[in-house]
Amino acid sequence: GKFDHCGIVVPGYNKDKKDMFDPSNLLLLEATASGGIVARSLLSRLERSQSRTVILLPLVSAGERRGDDDYEPSDQTKRLETYKEKRLIEFRNKWTEQSQKQGYSSAHSTLGIIGALGYALGMQETSRAPVSPSAWVVVSALQHAGVGENLNYRTAMETKVEAFLRDHRFHETDTVRLRPGWKFLPPVTMREMSRS
């Protein structure tokens, strides 16, 4: 399928670590035309979304098992998760602040158009605009958290939204590559409406 927007789930502003992953405290970090790079409540964002299809792509670290009631994460897995959380919070704080300071919201649409035109003309390798501003934010956050492979400076700039759903083992291009041990689980469909 074709997707035109994405975001990354990041920990909320809650100070109490045990409440950090309560669904009501999770935030969706995304690049928008209205507010720039923003972190909004995941639950309210999903409720207000007008998209026909909304999916979540769960991310797991090496050795992590989801859906297993008897699973107890190892110390190494806990350290990886703690490091990822800390780095995602740093990224969230840095880019939401930079977005406001630099007036990103007024440039979002222009960046998206320039990036899409550059891609359509085969000039994405030299364009100074990301192919997809929302994919750029997500890939940059994954790289900052030590999860996404940073193959080169252009990796985040040339990523399209649908690349998150393509497995790098079967596709050489247009994929999001994660560092060894990390992987995306199958997508979870939150909403799917047919076109009328």
Image: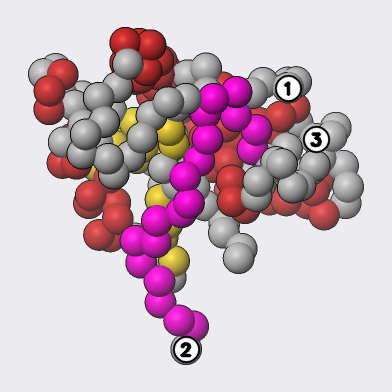
Q: Residue at x 57, y 59 (%)?
A: 3
Q: Earlier in the sequence, mark 2 or mark 3?
A: 3
As helix, strand or loop, the secondary structure at mark 2 comes to loop
Residue picked out by circle 1: 151
Disc 1 and disc 3: Cα gap in Å? 18 Å
Residue picked out by circle 2: 196
Disc 2 and disc 3: Cα gap in Å? 37 Å
As helix, strand or loop, the secondary structure at mark 3 comes to loop
Q: Earlier in the sequence, mark 1 or mark 3?
A: 3
Q: Which residue type carries mark 1?
A: Leu
Extreme-right residue of the structure: 122
Residue picked out by circle 3: 127
- Residue 14 drawn above or below residue 112: above
Q: Nearer the viewer, residue 118 or 55?
A: 55
Answer left or right for 29 relative to 179: left
Q: Quadrant of residue 13?
A: top left
Give the label, 1 or 3, closer to the camera: 1
Give the label, 1 or 2, closer to the camera: 1
* Residue 60 shows in the view: yes
Q: Is residue 178 magenta?
A: yes
What residue span does the magenta drawing correspond to? 176-195
Q: Which residue type carries mark 2?
A: Ser
Q: Position of residue 2 (x, y in %)?
A: 61, 63
Q: Residue at x 88, y 47 (%)?
A: 122
Q: Position of residue 143 (x, y in %)?
A: 56, 22
